[in-house]
Amino acid sequence: MTIEENKTVARRYFLEVWNETNLDLIDELLDPGYVRMGGRQIYGAPITPDVQKGVITRFKEAFPDATFTIIDQIAEGDTVVNRMRATGTHKGTREFMGIPPTGNSFECDIIAILVIKDGRIASSMVSDDDLGLLQQLGATIQLPQ
């Protein structure tokens, strides 16, 4: 695949799967052996394509209007880096990280490094600002004394 084709796969994953909650595309865009590294892990389980469907569903249930905007996209070989901004409102039916819906809006920056193999995302490393997001939802952090 060309670099431009790899960039298209990376764009589709966030713009169509995450923004539009088109979970049917996961099987097309994620390799069956997909592994997500870094970021939140769900109950210590590896993030596989099937697990990722649940992650996206739960996130969109908490933030139904969540939108990912790609600000920069850089690619070399089979690696694509998306610098993004996520926005949304915690007005859904599900809690997020133990916090019931607050009605608060959030905005945070995300870096996603995706490795594309044969037209599918084989792995990703995602870095986001969970602390900033939680603060925008009104969570307080207590440091140990």
Image (spheres, rainbow, N blue to C red):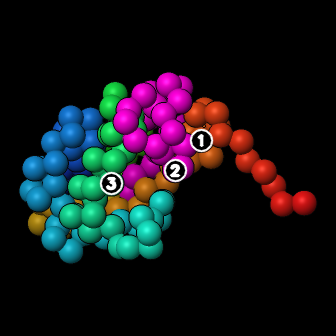
Give the residue drawn at x 40%, y 41%: 94
Q: Is residue 139 left or right of residue 91?
A: right
Left or right: 115 as drawn, with respect to 135: left
Q: Which residue position is annotated with label 1?
A: 134
How busy is the neighbourhood of tag 1: few (under 14 within 10 Å), some, or many (20 plus)?
A: some
> Mark on residue 49?
none
Residue highlighted by disc 2? 97
The percent coordinates of residue 131 (x first, y second) are 62, 46
- Choose top left, top right, bottom left or bottom right for residue 30: bottom left
**In 3D space, how far apart are the residues under numbered discs 1 and 3 (Cα atoms)?**
17 Å
Instruction: Give the mark nearest the N terminus, 1 or 3.
Output: 3
Identify which amino acid the numbered label 3 is placed on: Val
Residue at the image point whose x is 53% and y is 30% from the top: 102
> Foreground residue, 109 or 49?
49
Tell me if label 1 and label 2 are in contact, CB under 8 Å: yes
**Rendering coords of residue 65 (x, y %):** 34, 28
Residue designated by label 3? 55
Q: Is residue 85 above or below residue 30?
A: above
Q: CA distance from mark 2 to mark 3?
A: 12 Å
Q: Nearer the viewer, mark 1 or mark 2?
A: 2
As displayed, is residue 106 above or below residue 24? above
Q: On the rendered image, what quadrant is the N terminus found in?
A: bottom left
Of callouts 1 and 2, the N-terminal one? 2
Give the position of the C terminus as an image quadrant.
Answer: bottom right
Which segment is the magenta one? 85-113
Give how far apart the Cα atoms at labels 1 and 2 are: 8 Å
* SS state under label 1: helix
